[in-house]
Image (tube, grey):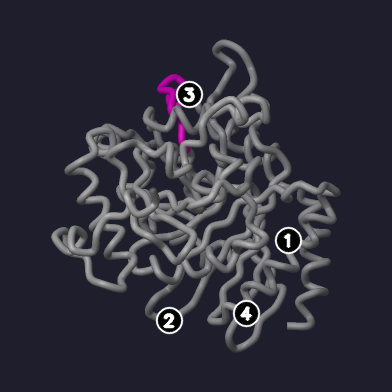
Amino acid sequence: MIADKIVSTDELRKFGAEDGDYAGQGRALLAQQKTVWEQLARGFKSLDTVRVRKFRFDGFDLNVQFNPGRIISSAAKVDEKSIKERKCFLCVQNLPREQRGIAYGLNYLILCNPFPIFPEHFTIPHIHHVPQRIDDAFEVLLDLSEDLGKYYTVFYNGPKCGASAPDHLHFQAGNKGFMLIEDQHEHFKRSFGAVLHRNTRSEITAIDDGLRRFITIETHSKHTAKSVFNSFYELLTDHSNTDEEPMMNIISLYDTGREKWRVLLIPRAKHRPSFYFKEGSDKILLSPAAVDFGGVLITPVEKDFNLLTGEHIKQMFKEVSLDPDEFRNLIKQLQQKLEDL
């Protein structure tokens, strides 16, 4: 069944792909799928009507995007009962008839996302129905970032942090530079950053810009990235005091010219803000995940897009982000662990 869902190399070459270039193959896959899968073509065509509002904060911007095609994800029911009662839409046997993808290693498929945020948007699920859990899959995230790094940024949403399929391990990828946090990163480091560790090959920085709190790994070493992540994951697990995966989003991009990863580890306190659960006109359907923390907030309802204010945005990040005192405690403990790097 997996083989039936793989686009042939010869077919991808027709759309400009070169062997061994996953980023180019992804771009070719999207072009190919638009010609044979009407729902996908409509989804990407709908991006032509997306509207954007820009909000200015302390030296940086955030965009709010009105994207009605994302209603399925933003309004997804991710409680245990709802998950059990629906078919998993990432399992191979449940994919749309027209959908095809690219094999990535032995265990993953690169698929086009029919409900896009980015001009080029991909979902990369495991071929087996295994839970959304990053602790044993972080190296895959790094590899994907490297292999797709010519064009794309890769990201991960935790099972309670925006993943609309919390029961099936998957990553996503989209155009580099689309998330504002990518180009603003140096400003964040200068204005809001505290260096936790630095050597000739790596720099680990904690950043609190007043809205978001996250830790950045910048390194030429995959081993260093894994070591820092493992320490972060262990500390966040201890802080969460739960057997479930600690709440987090991750954004990872790879500089192909400098052969360097930049990984943003974003600890979370809560899945959705309180106004998400209100009734009537007070309800705002804004369910933040990695892209929202990356500087592009997705609103699938036009009323919410028009009425959203800077205060709403501040409230949302305050509620769903790790508390400032807890973040300071986390980075203090992490810095102690980094002394052994």
Structural distance between the alpha carbons of marks 2 and 3 = 41 Å
Image: 158 above or below 165: below
Which tag is nearer the camera, tag 1 or tag 3? 1
> Mark 1 or mark 4, which has the lower sequence index?
4
Residue at figure coordinates x 52%, y 68% from the top left:
142
Local SS, label 2? loop
Residue underneath mark 1: 233
Residue at figure coordinates x 49%, y 44% from the top left:
56
Q: Are marks 2 and 4 in contact (CB under 8 Å)?
A: no
- What secondary structure do most residues of the magenta stretch adopt? helix
Local SS, label 1? helix
Q: Can you name the residue that lies furthest to the front here?
A: 1
Disc assigned to residue 304? 3
Q: Are marks 3 and 4 in contact (CB under 8 Å)?
A: no
* Residue 25, quarter of picture: bottom left
Disc 2 residue type (three-letter)? Arg
Which tag is nearer the camera, tag 3 or tag 4? 4
Residue at figure coordinates x 36%, y 56% from the top left:
175
Local SS, label 4? helix
Picture coordinates of residue 197, whole percent (x, y): 70, 78
Q: Nearer the viewer, residue 102 or 144?
A: 102
Q: Are marks 2 and 1 in contact (CB under 8 Å)?
A: no
Q: Is residue 77 left or right of residue 330?
A: left
Disc 1 residue type (three-letter)? Tyr
Structural distance between the alpha carbons of marks 2 and 1 = 27 Å
Residue at figure coordinates x 22%, y 65% from the top left:
17
Residue underneath mark 4: 223
Structural distance between the alpha carbons of marks 3 and 4 = 43 Å
